């Protein structure tokens, strides 16, 4: 299986490249800067890795770089700025596509704008295959499935402040002042911070109630594609929301390019989904683990593998539209993830 990694010279891309090699697939490294790509390949011990140089301003070359690959994993962000040409090139090359974006409005744009092109090309495009996007979407599907009808879904990222890369901070800064979206009565609106502000019970040992605020998570735009809910919204811990809101350009560039190994290992990610049926029945589920960037690489490569194996419907899709939710979450367990659903 041949998997193209676009943006392999970055932190997340390097982890994805290492994961492609660990899984025994053949990586093709694609990006704009040959020397940086060569260094990235060497870091994974892959002096023999094939390198193809193509910039975003050369669509034919970019599509050509992907052409004989089974799937593309795009890790070059901010996606709001640089994502679209890579989606177009993957579709033009007839390659399945996943990426590591967490940018909510960009995700909605890709899901809305490229569905027809992807269907005509016979490829499946699943953006947001990260530690929050995929687990949040899949666990929401499992919680909602416990109820007959679903009125309200809340997807929450309950991690404490922890490891973050400069690339993540740049992406948070690139999404700017746009208010978090929410899905309500078949339409998109914005969630005001005050409206969603409340506390949530953190599952697991040592949990407790923590204050949360609304935040533009991927689940708001992916979950309505497979759960018929009246309302879908998202929240994160209030202290993490405040941290992201306080990012200035100077602060972003002062963040280390890569979090160190110790802070990665100490960082726990935790995605919660709560579903309610409007008549008092509720169900909730959560997925958790450590090393958010490591698991993002595992999730993106496992997604690419499943698409390349065939059988997924063509088009732009949410994770739970194309991957069996429980089966996919189970595949993360050997990498330290744990998940649970209760209620209903
Ligand atoms: N949970 C999540 O939402 C989650 C988790 C993990 C990662 N991510 C996202 O993944 C992205 C990467 O993060 P990171 O920390 O790996 O960032 P990074 O280390 O800064 O890497 C960025 C990559 O993008 C490439 N790139 C940037 N601008 C480009 C352009 N104009 N043309 C072509 N390539 C370009 C860079 O290539 P050069 O080396 O040539 O500059 C590099 O390979 C971010 O958007 C981050 O938010 C999200």
Image (spheres, rainbow, N blue to C red):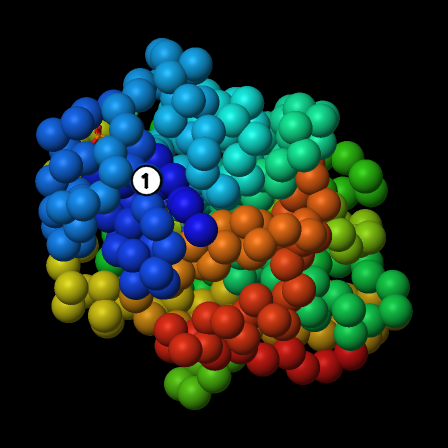
**Would residue 9 be seen by someone viewing this image from the given angle?**
yes
* Residue displayed at 55% across by 23% down: 92
Whether 91 is drawn above or below 180: the answer is above
Whether 184 is drawn above or below 52: the answer is below
* Residue 66, percent from left and from top: 42, 30
Given the current orientation, which residue lies at the most extreme bottom position?
205
**Residue under pointer 1:** 28
* Residue 97, percent from left and from top: 52, 39
Quadrant location of ligand 1?
top left
Left or right for 178, reference 254: right
| Res. 38 image quadrant | top left
Q: Depth check: 333 or 266 in front?
A: 333
- Badge 1: how crowded within 10 Å, few (<14), some, or many (20+)? many
* Residue displayed at 54% across by 75% down: 330
* Residue displayed at 39% across by 61% down: 298
* Residue 16, percent from left and from top: 32, 51
* Residue displayed at 45% across by 38% down: 69
Total count of labels: 1
Left or right for 292, reference 323: left
| Res. 85 image quadrant | top left
* Residue 32, percent from left and from top: 25, 23
Q: Depth check: 2 or 129 in front?
A: 2
| Res. 188 image quadrant | top right
**Would residue 180 be seen by someone viewing this image from the given angle?**
no
The quarter of the image holding the C terminus is bottom right
Secondary structure type for disc 1:
strand
Q: Depth check: 16 or 22 in front?
A: 22
């Amino acid at each position: 299986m041949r998997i193209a990694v676009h943006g392999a010279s970055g932190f997340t891309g390097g982890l994805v490249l290492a994961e492609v090699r660990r899984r025994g697939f053949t990586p093709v490294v694609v990006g704009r800067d040959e020397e940086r790509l060569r260094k990235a390949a060497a870091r994974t011990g892959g002096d023999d890795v094939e390198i193809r140089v193509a910039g975003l301003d050369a669509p034919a070359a970019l599509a050509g770089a992907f052409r004989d690959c089974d799937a593309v994993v795009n890790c070059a962000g901010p996606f709001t700025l640089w994502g679209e040409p890579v989606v177009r090139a993957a579709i033009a090359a007839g390659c399945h596509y996943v990426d590591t974006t967490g940018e909510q409005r960009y995700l909605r744009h890709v899901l809305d704008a490229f569905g027809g092109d992807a269907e005509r090309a016979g490829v499946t495009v699943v953006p947001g295959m990260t530690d929050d996007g995929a687990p949040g979407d899949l666990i929401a599907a499992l919680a909602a499935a416990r109820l007959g009808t679903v009125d309200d879904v809340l997807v929450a990222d309950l991690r404490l402040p922890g490891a973050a890369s400069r690339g993540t901070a740049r992406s948070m800064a690139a999404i700017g002042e746009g208010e978090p979206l929410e899905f309500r009565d078949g339409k998109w609106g914005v969630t005001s911070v005050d409206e969603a502000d409340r506390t949530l019970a953190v599952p697991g040992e040592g949990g407790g109630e923590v204050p949360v605020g609304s935040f533009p998570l991927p689940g708001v735009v992916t979950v309505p594609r497979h759960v018929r809910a009246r309302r879908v919204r998202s929240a994160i811990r209030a202290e993490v929301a405040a941290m992201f809101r306080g990012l200035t350009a100077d602060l972003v560039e002062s963040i280390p390019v890569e979090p160190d190994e110790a802070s990665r290992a100490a960082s726990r990610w935790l995605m919660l989904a709560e579903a309610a049926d409007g008549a008092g029945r509720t169900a909730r589920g959560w997925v958790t683990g450590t090393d958010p960037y490591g698991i993002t690489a595992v999730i993106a490569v496992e997604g690419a593998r499943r698409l390349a194996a065939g059988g997924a419907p063509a088009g732009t899709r949410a994770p739970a539209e194309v991957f069996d939710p429980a089966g996919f979450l189970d595949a993360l367990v050997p990498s330290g993830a744990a998940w649970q659903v209760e209620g209903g």
